[in-house]
Each structure stands twice: as structure tokens, then as C-alpha cells.
Image (cartoon, coloured by chain):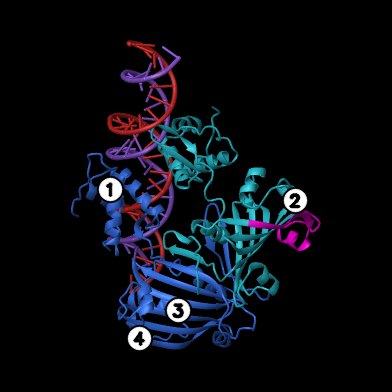
Chain colours: A blue, B cyan, C red, D purple
Amino acid sequence: MTERRLDRTGGQPLWKQLQQDLVRRLRAGEFDDLFPGELALVEDYQVSRHTVRQALGKLRTDGLIVAERGRQPRVATAPEIRQPMGALYSLFSSVEASGLTQHSVVRALDVRADGVIAARLDLEASIPLLYLERLRFAGDEPLALDRVWLPASLAEPLLDADFTHTSLYNELAARTGIRLDHGREDIRAVVPTPAERTLLHCPPEAAAFSINRQGTSQNRPVEWRHTLVRGDRFALSAEFSANTGYRLTAGAVTHTA
Amino acid sequence: MTERRLDRTGGQPLWKQLQQDLVRRLRAGEFDDLFPGELALVEDYQVSRHTVRQALGKLRTDGLIVAERGRQPRVATAPEIRQPMGALYSLFSSVEASGLTQHSVVRALDVRADGVIAARLDLEASIPLLYLERLRFAGDEPLALDRVWLPASLAEPLLDADFTHTSLYNELAARTGIRLDHGREDIRAVVPTPAERTLLHCPPEAAAFSINRQGTSQNRPVEWRHTLVRGDRFALSAEFSANTGYRLTAGAVTHTA
DNA sequence: ACGCTAGAAATGTACGCACATTTAAGCTAG
DNA sequence: CTAGCTTAAATGTGCGTACATTTCTAGCGT
């Protein structure tokens, strides 16, 4: 291995330099196939194993690598579980958890331009966007009207996908490798329009959640989404504590008021 | 100092036993005035400084103690900032952040019994509850109808408090020392009743958030709250990322649809 | 070709030492 | 009596060693 050098003038601790360099190389994809062992790092960087372990310990607590006895450390498996997040994911996963099967009716799947949405994605108005509009069912009843815009340059491979049963994020990850890692949501309470009410089979006096969501992957805007969720059957649940912060738990399926 | 013993048969690592014992003693309040130094722990537990540092390192990353060079470790200052949490706090703090002044009209403040609410607090039906009902204003417009029940045995000192401008949690902490450390919320979208609509000055076709919340302090149910928030002017905002999880940011004040 | 076993390899735990750096206490001088 | 300096104490960093425990691998025998 090439011998790497660290700054020993005392500017920063050796283990911290090592840790930062490893993060850099890790993000560059250098360790995708095999993460070096402790002794290899000792050789490469010419530091003691204690220092190496101090750096690896931080990487471990940060969740970047996982280690076991007798086995070389490995890059932490991509955030599989926590990839889809937010209120929407909470709602839809709770539906599965409650035993109801989900499916969607695709009402539109094409490429079009929309200056307003493009601006929300920090893109030029003329840039083509992939547009997907679905009516999502939980069991036999409509649950939500879901409309998503993604830059066509990224999402074009999704044009011939079948979204009746698969989720957008799974398809996106499978066909393009893109995974959302950040996002923000605005959740509002609204009264659906008569057209929306008909579409969702809403009772006459029911409210709904209107959720706007912008998702990014590696600081690049990837999706802009608007979802209208029936408010008469579904609610958001959250738990919070001083330690764990605010966590959406299984969004509850409330039967009646 | 008394000499403490650890199990060296290999059942659990020494540093882990030490860490757990320190957590136990810390929770018992043994170190409220002074946390022992590393060398003192070396003497007490008869282990090497390396082992002590391993245990303290975990306590540090868990946020239980803070340490600095040349200074003995100290018990981390109690969770000062993160005490009030959740969607409600997010909403009301965002109102302040937007420059609007808040005040409340106290519609009821008394002690009564309510079997349904008591059950939700895991209490017997006959136990008296302090009941506080407020109409909360942001600026000159009503924002929310807020109803709170607390066990009278704990909250009786609040009976003569003036809730026109102070928050319940501040008053509760000041008069009884109780601080919420855990809770859960259910957030639903509803259409307010005509009476509620009149009270909140809602436009005819506006929805609202209905938030039910149960708060606990040290595993003891302390409050049950129902808040109805106007949905035409206020929204919940959240950010989430793979690292930080789901965080409610300043709940937005949306002007129009 | 397959299964089992013994050895090699890697990480986890635990001990020790030395020195740097910062804080806190004590002491001296004005 | 106070200000400033010196010294002691405590943590941070870094090195080394040894052994335990687990995993992987290679070779042996059937």
C-alpha cells in the first residue's frame, strides 16, 4: 500500500486527521469492496494501533462502518431502513403494518415541463420533468392522491416502470441508484375540493392532510411532491423524549372520531 | 474511598461494568456536586486508566458527562433547552419567531373529575384533575383552542397562576419543579364544528389540526392535552436527513393557500 | 468432492508508560 | 490584601505489549 503521511506538528490530533482522511476516502468510494484492517492502517499511516482504533471508534459510533471480532471492518450497509423517511413514509408503512394491502392507480406518467415546480426544485423553467400521479389505495378504500415531479434527466428510466405495487423510492434506487438522504416537508390541514373529495371517496365533512415535500440526494434536488391524505381515517403519531428527540412512530389508523 | 469490585470472570467487559455502575450512581445523584476524576476511579475500581477512559468515553458520547482538559469531568447540565418539544411547541415558537406576540384568554381554570381523561392518564376515574382551557392568540387573531388536564395532586400550585402570557410548562417547572421528558402526540386533520369555528374566527371552509398529546415526567403521566389549531394560517414544517432523523423546524406561518 | 479440523488472522479487552496541555490551587512579592 | 507567578493536578494524546475471542482459510482425511 502507498504510505500516507499525517501532520505531526500538533495542529490536530493524529486520530482525528486519520478519521477525517478515512471519511474522505470512504465517501470517494475507495473502500466499497473492502475496508482495510487495523494493522493495514497501522502500516499505511505509520501510527500505533491505539490511534487507529481511536479513529475507527469514531467512525463506528457515527455509523459509517461496522466491526466484529475477528472480521475486518466493513462499510456500513447503506442506510437501508432509514432511507425513506418523513410523515408520508410513516403513514404508508403504518398501513402495511395494520395488515391492509396497498396498491396504486397510475393516473399519469409522462414527461412535461412546469415552470412553477421546476423553480421549487431549483431548476430552470424549461427543464423537462417526469410527472407521476397516483391514487393510492389502502385495502379497497382510497387513501391519498400523490403527485410527484422529478428531473427527467435523472428519472427517465422510470418511464416504463409499473407503479401499481412498487414504491417510487424502490424503483428509483433500483433503476438509477439514487437514494434520498435529505428532505423537508410542510404539513397542512385543508378541506379537499369537491373533485378531490369524489376521487378519494371522502365523507362530506372530512378534512385532509396536504403534504408538500422536497427531497434531495447529495445536495441535489430530486423530487417535489404533493400528497393529499384523507384525514378521516389516518393520523400522524409521534413520540418524543429528551434523549431520542422527535420520532414519528407507526402512523395510526384511526377508525372513527 | 471505598474500594469497589468488578467481576473479572469475563462475563462482561470491565469497562462496560464500570460504565453501567457509573450510570447507576449518577442517576442516584451521587455525583451531583462532584464527579470523580479518572485517577480516583482507577484507585476505587482497581482498573487501568485505559479502562476508565473507555467507560468515560461512552458516558461522554451518551451526553451524560462533559470533560475538558485539566478539569475534572462534570455531570452534563440537565437538558435545559430541549425540555418542551413536539408539534405544539414547534407551532407556538414559530409564532414568536415570526414577530407576532402571543397571549391567551383563560376560559376555565379549576379542579374537576373526568373519568375518560383520567383513564388516558392511567389514573382512577375519581381522581381530581386540574383543568385549564385557553384560547390562544397570535397577534390579534385566534390561533388555537387548548385544553389541558393534569393530576391535581401535582398541579394544584397552578390554580392561582395567570396564564395570560406565561406558558404552562414554564409555570409548571417554576412552581412544582416538574419537567416533561417524554410524550406522544396524535395529529389529525379535522373540520372544526360551527362552535369552534366561531371561537377561532375560522373562515367558512377551513380545516384544522387536532392534536392529542400525552406528556410524562419520569415515567409518570403528567398531562393530557387536546389542542385545535387553525389550519388556514398555520402549518407544520419538518426536516429530515439520514443523519439527524426527523426534526420539526420552525413551524411555518403560511399566509394564504 | 466434501466435511472436518487446526492454524492463521483480525478485532476486542486490558495493562503499562510517557509526555503535552490545560486548569486550578497555592505561594510569594509588592 | 491583592496581583501575578509558579507548581501541582487532571485530562488529552500517543506509543507499546500481551492475551482472549472470534472468523476465515487452508489442508487433511475420508
Q: What is the distance, in whole Å, between disc 1 and disc 3 at their CAs?
A: 41 Å
Q: Give the residue pinned by disc 1.
A: A17
Residue B87 or residue A105, whichever sits in front = B87
On whether disc 1 and disc 2 are found on a single subunit, the reply is no
Pointer 3 chain: A
Of the two numbered discs 3 and 4 in the rendering, the one whose residue sits closer to the viewer: 4
Tag 4: amino acid: Val
Type of the residue with mark 3 = Ser
Residue that badge 4 annotates: A111
According to the picture, the residue beneath numbered tag 2 turns out to be: B152
In the displayed orientation, state which residue is furthest to the right: B126
Of mark 1 and mark 3, the one earlier in the sequence is 1
In the rendered image, which quarter is residue D26 located in?
Answer: bottom left
Given the image, what chain letter belongs to the residue carrying mark 1? A
**Callouts 4 and 2 in the same chain:** no
- Which residue does the numbered mark 3 point to in the structure image? A167
Q: Which portion, as a residue range, is magenta?
A: B104-128
For mark 3, does the 10 Å Cα neighbourhood hold few (<14), some (14 to 19), or many (20 or more) residues? few
Please tell me whether mark 1 sits on a helix, a strand or a loop: helix
| Alpha carbon distance from label 2 to label 3 | 49 Å
Check disc 4: other Cα within 10 Å, few if <14, some if 14-19, many if 20+: some
User: In the picture shown, does residue C26 fall above or below B153?
Assistant: above
- Note whether residue B117 is visible: yes
Tell me the residue at 44%/59% (across/down): B244
Q: Residue furthest front?
A: B140
